[in-house]
Image: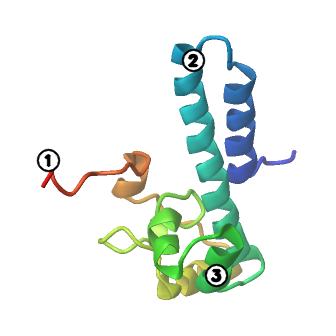
């Protein structure tokens, strides 16, 4: 029995969202496009996590391949199924967390999902000010 990877599941969900888009109706199309973007983001994040665990790449290399700065990688990895359990209380996966995940993988251990991981929402833009200056 083959297990589908988290990245494959996210990509399939993005495809389904894209298949449901009626471009003739922008009001209905935008939520579907947003859903597809969120699922593609999930696929990118899960693929970065897989790169770190399967190919033992660095956070910097994963970020570079994904077109992200090194500082943007940690919070995104914290939302993944593969590395979310190794996130710090601040919501980042660090090099130390990746080392621990590799060690656990070598020993065949599966970590329990963190409470943060089970209730995560997609990252959203938050304006710094509520009123224009």
Q: Which residue is mark 1?
A: 130
Q: Camera-side residue: 53 or 19?
A: 19
Quarter holding the C terminus is: bottom left
Q: CA distance from mark 3 to mark 2?
A: 45 Å
Q: CA distance from mark 1 to mark 2?
A: 28 Å
Observer able to see residue 127: yes
**SS under mark 2:** helix
Which of the marked residues, 3 or 1, is nearer the chain's N terminus? 3
Mark 1 and mark 2 residues within 8 Å of each other at the beta carbon? no
Q: Give the percent coordinates (x, y) of residue 9.
A: 71, 42
Marks counted in the figure total 3
Mark 1 nearby-residue class (10 Å; few <14, some 14–19, many ≥20): few
Residue 89 badge: none
Residue at x 50%, y 63% (from the top left corner):
76
Look at the picture and state if 78 lies above or below 15. Answer: below
Name the quadrant containing residue 116. bottom left
The extreme front residue here reads 133
**SS under mark 1:** loop
Name the quadrant containing residue 110. bottom right
Mark 3 and mark 2 residues within 8 Å of each other at the beta carbon? no
| Left or right relative to 39: residue 73 | left
Q: Which residue is mark 2?
A: 26
Q: Camera-side residue: 60 or 94?
A: 60
Mark 3 nearby-residue class (10 Å; few <14, some 14–19, many ≥20): some
Q: Which residue is mark 3?
A: 102
Which of the marked residues, 3 or 2, is nearer the chain's N terminus? 2
Q: Give the percent coordinates (x, y) of residue 10.
A: 67, 43
């Amino acid at each position: 029995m083959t297990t589908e990877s988290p990245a494959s599941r996210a990509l399939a969900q993005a495809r389904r969202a894209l298949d449901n888009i009626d471009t003739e109706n922008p009001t209905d199309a935008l939520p579907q496009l947003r859903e597809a973007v969120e699922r593609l983001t999930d696929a990118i994040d899960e693929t970065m996590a897989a790169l770190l665990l399967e190919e033992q790449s660095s956070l910097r290399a994963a970020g570079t391949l994904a077109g992200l700065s090194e500082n943007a990688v940690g919070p995104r990895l914290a939302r993944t199924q593969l590395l979310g359990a190794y996130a710090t209380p601040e919501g980042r996966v660090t090099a130390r967390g990746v080392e621990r995940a590799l060690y656990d993988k070598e020993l065949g251990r599966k970590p329990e999902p963190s409470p943060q991981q089970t209730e995560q929402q997609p990252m959203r833009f938050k304006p710094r000010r509520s009123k224009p200056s």
